[in-house]
Structure formats: C-alpha cells, structure tokens
Amino acid sequence: MSPVRNRNRRSAFTLIELLVVIAIIAVLIGLLLPAVQKVREAAARSTCTNNLKQIGLGMQNFHDATSHFPIGEYNDDNNQWGWMAFLLPYVEQENIYKALTNPAVGSRMYVPQGFGGSSNDGCGGNIDNIHGVNGSYPVGVCDTNDVGGVGAVNTVIKIFICPSNTLPSQKGNNYGATHYCGNIGNTVNWSSKPTFGCGGVTGDQNNGILCYSNNNTNTYVVKIPQITDGSSNTVMVGEVTNTSTITPSSFNNGHTPVWVGGQGGGCNGTTDMVGVFRVMDTSYPLNGNADQCFGSRHTGGANFLFCDGSVRFIGNDVGATAVYSAIGSRNGGETFSLP
C-alpha cells in the first residue's frame, strides 16, 4: 500500500517548481516585449510614411490644378490660414473645406483668387483688412480664429497625425493638430532680416517650398520649374514633435502645430511661425530642441516628403550637416548625395 500513497502525494507541483515556471515565463515576456514594441513601431512608422505619401499626392494634384504649390501662410501675424487648409480638397477632405468656405457662414476662410501668387490677387491693401473680391468677405475673415465656431476646424484629420508621436492630436478642445509642417528652407537669405515676425523674412527670401508672406500685400508660391536643385533632392514637408516649448503638457500654447494654420497671433521672431513651418539648417538640426526644428518620435531620425512625391527617412546624423541644409533649399545648387 505504501507505493500507492507516494504516487498520490506527487500529484501537485512543489513551490520550487512553480517558482521556476514563473521565472521562465518572466524571461520569455522580457524577450518578447522588445520584439512586440519593434513591430508596433514599424507599423506606426509605415503609417506615418503613408500619411506623407498621401500629402505628397495631394500636393501634386494641387499643383496640377493651380500650376503651383500652396501658399505656406499668407500674413505676418501668424494667425492665418496655412497650406494644409488649402490642401483639404486634394486629400479627400472636401466636406471640411466646404464647411470652412461656406458662404452661408458669416465669417469664413479667405481663399485668394487662384490660391495666391500675386499682390493679393486684386484685393488690394493690407490683407488684415481685406473684404475680398467685390466685398464678398467680411473684415478679418483671413484670421483662423474668425471661424473658430465652425466645428470643422476642430476636426482631427487622420493623415495629419503620426501614430508614433507623443504630442496630442488636438489643441485642447479646439483645432485639430498636425504632426507635419512645411519646409520653409534654410537661413542663407536671412542676413538682412533674421526674424519671421512683422517686417522680417518675406516669401521672396524663403528658399524652401512653402513660403511665408509677412508683408500684408503679397502671396508667395513655388512652381515645379523653380525647384532647380531637382524635385528628388528637395524636401517639401517633414515630421514635427516635442521641442523646448512644444510638449504634451504645453500643447495649448501659441506655437502648437495645427492644420488650419498659424496660431501664434503675434510678431515674435521665428517662434510664432512654427505652427506651420520648420527650418532646415545646421542652426536648426533634425530633432534639435528649438521650436523651429523638424523631428519625430521614431528612433534615429524622421520621415520627410520630397517634391517628387517620395518619402525618405533622414537620420539624425545627416540632420546636423550641410546636406540637411542643401535638401532644404530648392535652388542652392549644392552637390551632395543622400545615404
């Protein structure tokens, strides 16, 4: 009978055996977790790349329709409609665009005739006081805040959001955010006017693709033939993320990147233009801490949309060199090669 009793006693695990099993499971989880995180980041980075490709296709379609790329932002107080708002009909966001430009709304988005490229397109005078062609637009309609009551401006648009980014997808309860900004160029032409505030660097001094119009009377646009460095060598749009003052906890400040346009509402040098633009220069390296820098939460660099519609990942090592400044300029004539 004794052997039978011994077999019954061995029907359960001992405490040591349980601890060994738990330890093995913990080791396996520790090995699997980094792999799962890598898979998730790879998927997020792929989504981010696809977002930029869709933006690039929209840009090409916009150029086909208007013979130029959009205005970057059309006034000096950094509270104006930006290039993403003009791009909406070309990225399958026609309903939002119609809501912003609806004639039945008392204040609505001001769209220059032909989407810009001249001296206020015949409207004349300071764009802050524009009534529009034949007086059809109310005073001040160029300000993004004027249609703040239209819910469309609060919409979070999926292709403007990178899933890897730690910044919010909305500015408080207002304004859909964006994790992509336009390339305004490098600083080679800034010597006489080293700021972007009122009376600072104007669109004719921007050597990027999306230009800033801060003199009230002119809108500046870029056409493909003006990209003499080559469309495959020139950046149009890049990722933006946390900086010294743009953080998840301070995302309601005036520097917040939002797709409607600038939210600075002032003339404070190069800081208020960062709601729409970034600078590509060794003074503003990739993933630098300054608000004017491009950057991302991807490991080692960021995604950039080039003017030929391609999307390439630029490493931080390149983003601090003369090559980075070169791909930020449309007409610098530099000789370089990207890795």
Image (cartoon, rainbow, N blue to C red):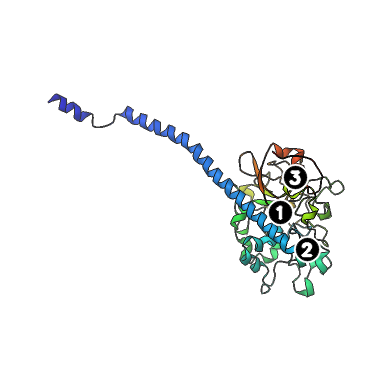
Marked residue nearer the N-terminal end (3 or 1): 1
Q: Residues within 10 Å of mark 3 (few under 14, many from 20)?
A: many
Closer to the camera in the image, 103 or 220: 220
Residue labelled with disc 2: 116
Residue labelled with disc 3: 327
In the image, residue 255 sits, relative to residue 36, either above or below, namely: below
Q: Residues within 10 Å of mark 1 (few under 14, many from 20)?
A: many
Farthest residue to the left: give it.
1
Residue 163 in picture, x, y percent from top left: 57, 49
Q: Residue at x 43, y 32 (%)?
A: 27
In the image, residue 26 sits, relative to residue 222, either above or below, namely: above
The answer to whether any part of residue 167 appears in the image is no
Marked residue nearer the N-terminal end (2 or 3): 2
Occupied quadrant, residue 198: bottom right
Q: Amino acid at mark 1?
A: Val
Judged from the image, the secondary structure of the residue bearing numbered disc 2 is loop
Q: Mark 2 and 3 residues: CB-CB less than 8 Å, in contact?
A: no
Residue 63 in picture, x, y percent from top left: 73, 60
Residue 229 in picture, x, y percent from top left: 78, 47
Q: Mark 3 and 1 residues: CB-CB less than 8 Å, in contact?
A: no
Q: Amino acid at mark 3?
A: Ile
Horizontal side of residue 60 vs 220, given as left or right: left
The C terminus sits in image quarter:
top right
